[in-house]
Image (spheres, rainbow, N blue to C red):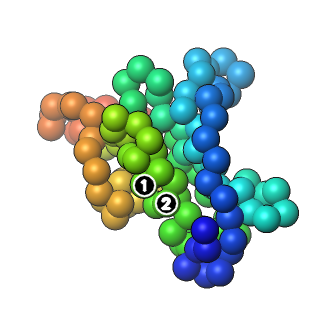
Amino acid sequence: MISTEGTTYEITYTVAAYSSTDAPAHRFQAITEDGTVASELFVDMTTLVIENIETAPQFRREGIATELFAAAEKQLPEALHARPAHRTEEGNGWAEAVGGETEDHDADEDEDEDPWN
């Protein structure tokens, strides 16, 4: 694939833990021709909620994370965004931009559970 800024990359899939203490997750990566991980997306194996999406600074705003989300939606039964209260401000913007479903939550929870403030 080629990003909006001309970065050539391949999307790969494997099962891997987000960190050494986490359970295995669906992992989608965008890897450039020289082997650099441009972006990666982790989706919980059971809940199908996105655990993390991260793009290296030099590859941001190229649509790569959006393509990873599309790949996850294509391969998995669904890929759900975390509740708004469990996202960063940047994560909220990205979730709104790419669309898709959000895990179930109560509207009151968004106001009560903001771990980022």
Task: Reply above or below: 63 against 75.
Answer: below
Please name the residue shown 54% across and 38% down the image: 42
Please name the residue shown 37% across and 24% down the image: 47
Tell me if mark 1 has few (under 14), some (14-19) or many (20+) residues whose alpha carbon lies within 10 angstroms of its own: some
Task: Reply above or below: 15 against 39.
Answer: above
The reply to whether the C-beta atoms of the residues labelled 1 and 2 are less than 8 Å apart is yes
Dot 2 amino acid type: Glu
| Side of 38 where 52 appears, left or right | left
- SS for tag 2? helix
Q: Give the quadrant of residue 58.
A: bottom right
Query: Which residue is labeled 1 in the image?
Result: 70
| Side of 107 where 14 appears, left or right | right
**Where residue 87 sits in the image (x, y, percent)?**
41, 44
Inspect this view and state whether residue 88 appears. Answer: no
**Where residue 7 sits in the image (x, y, percent)?**
68, 74
Inspect this view and state whether residue 66 appears. Answer: yes
**Where residue 60 sits in the image (x, y, percent)?**
59, 68
Dot 1 amino acid type: Ala
